[in-house]
Image (tube, rainbow, N blue to C red):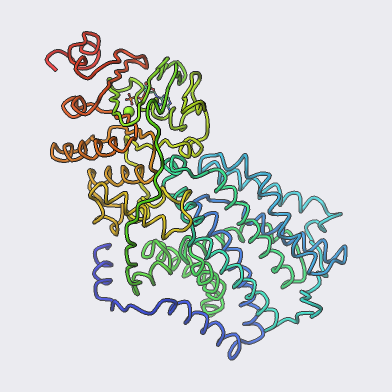
Amino acid sequence: MRKGVRKLWALAPTLTLPRWAGEGIGVAVLLAYALLYASPYGLRVLTVAGVYALAAIGFQIVFGLGGALSLAHGAFFGIGAYATGILGSQWGWGFAATFPVSLLVPLLLALLVGLPVLRLESHYFALATLGIAQVVHLLAVNSPGLTGGANGLPGVPGIVLFGWAVPRGLPLAAVVWGFVALGGLLAWRLARGRWGRALTLVRDDPLAAGTLGLDVGGLRLAAFALSAVYAGAAGALAVHTQRVVSPEVLEFPIMVSVLTIAVVGGRGRVAGAILGAVLLLHLPEWFRFLERSYLIVYGVALLATIVLAPHGLTGLLDRLFPARPALLPKPEAPPEMAIPNGPLLRVEGLTKGFGGVRAVDGVSLTLEAGAITGLIGPNGSGKTTLVNLISGLETPDGGRVLMGDVDLAGKRPDRIARAGIARTFQAVSLPEGASVLAAVAAARLERDGSIAQAEAHALWALERLDAADLAAKPCAGLPAALRRRVELARALARQPAVLLLDEPAAGLTDGEKAELAGHLRAIAATGTALLVVEHDMGFLLPLAGHVLCLDQGRPLYAGPPEGVRSDPAVVAAYLGEGA
Ligand code: ADP
Ligand code: MG
């Protein structure tokens, strides 16, 4: 099946259209339809499609870019709707006052509930946001004094813009779509900029994101809050279109529609939200003649889209009309970071327990500028945990991690990264959907002023590891050795004072190990202090100036590499006789 589809792709004409051709054609078709063809009823459907497009654009920010399945989006839509409904019909406020309030109330609620719920793992986050939607719905139905209860509130006034009462039909459609254009442009700029890149990294590689200096919690909260603003705006416009507000605006079908629009249109894409909304709202009209079997056709079409176009309709169009590959930037060395001489990192008495297991138990070590320190020990002896503690992915129970006079123990990963510590992972962690260049440039987002600059610096880091030729390749599908190299380049792009490498040679051939050793020596020669976790003594001992061996979280040996093989405790616990 997949193969057949791929063959079809090969047959499709690969036209490269000018940039913006697709968007231009889309806008022209919409305009021509609205101005020349649409009946009053058609204009009404188009207006509602605009409302859904705006809600879906906001959903693309939190779900598409941020990867958080927020089922509270429908609730924010409904709250925006009720804010406009109550203030407009009961208090007699005009659009100029109700509209900002309809954005503000969802925003405040999102900030309030976002802090606790965004900490949850993905499924629990979805469930918690669903709970928020349920509570809001119950409140609306059960507060008839305020909301009109199950009947809702009639008599919501229309939109008044600068003294002009916008009539229904073409003018209302134009105003709603004006908001879509405004919101779409803003979201598109955000998505393409450093903020959008950072957010997609949080989605695709959350573990690494913090260690690259990105404030994961802050980014997700901002995305959640901004999405709520879009939903509130859409809810307000929906009520102005209907002129009534009822608990329907808080019911689950709206949430499902927005989710469907985002997925069918293309996850994370503004154009996808608009295309999806226009299609989803017009399909029932076009297939009205099918009457009852419509839902079956709809379901089948939806399934077919998801299976055949997993990246949505905009993804499908991208494949049919691929954009010209972007030119690679010129590599550029980032401004030098002065690394002082002497001890850069002092770990003192670091301790961490998991339940009954003391994974790290009173470990101390010093990493000197320009020196490579080896960290060895049997599996489960606490090596990875030690690296996690230093880089902030785990919180120590006790002990200190000193850089100069600053104790970093227990600080957030992005703070520690900004202090000059970078790391790689035992199981390589890369954003699979991204190109190598984008993956490495992610390390510079927090520091550089633009994506172009971040990419130029990323290319410099790749060049230092003889991997510049990988820049345009996707991360997915790279062989293991190259994945490790890309990950190392990403850590290097941070110009770290301290670099922690968790089994960087695992799975490498002897030739690749020799190459890696050369690269590590070159990195150390610039003054960076390295900590290298490794099992292959033939690789590590010639490289390291100092070796620490752990066993059950406790230091077993700390000294020169020459002493490792002859140390009875290390031989007994780790290397075995004859090593
Ligand atoms: P190493 O990297 O040396 O193989 P680890 O640091 O991964 O060892 O693990 C040390 C010990 O801590 C092991 O007993 C492991 O099972 C335990 N451990 C590590 N991480 C966790 C965790 N998140 N939860 C519970 N136990 C853990
Ligand atoms: Mg490990």
Ligand 2's quadrant is top left
18 relative to 335, above or below: below
Whole-percent x, y for residue 270 in the image: 51, 66
357 or 46: nearer the viewer = 357
- Which residue is nearer to you in this view: 333 or 474? 333
Residue 266 shown left or right of residue 551 in the figure? right
Left or right for 430, reference 141: left
- In the displayed structure, 157 sits above or below 231; it is below
The residue lying furthest to the bottom in this view is 36
Residue 552, given in percent of the width and then of the height, sits at 35, 15
Which quadrant holds the C terminus? Answer: top left
At x 42%, y 50%, the residue is 444
The picture places residue 390, in percent across and down from the top left corner, at 43, 28
Position of 401 with respect to 83 (left or right) is left
Above-or-below relation of 317 to 446: below
Q: Quadrant of residue 41?
A: bottom right
Query: Which residue shows up at 32% across the image and 44% down it?
Result: 487
Q: Is residue 337 above or below residue 270?
A: above
Q: Closer to the camera, 404 or 25?
A: 404
The N terminus - image quarter: bottom left
Q: Residue at x 36, y 35 (%)?
A: 499
Q: Nearer the viewer, residue 333 or 207?
A: 333
Query: In the displayed image of the protein, which residue is found farthest to the top?
Result: 568
x and y percentages locating residue 420 in the rendered image: 43, 37
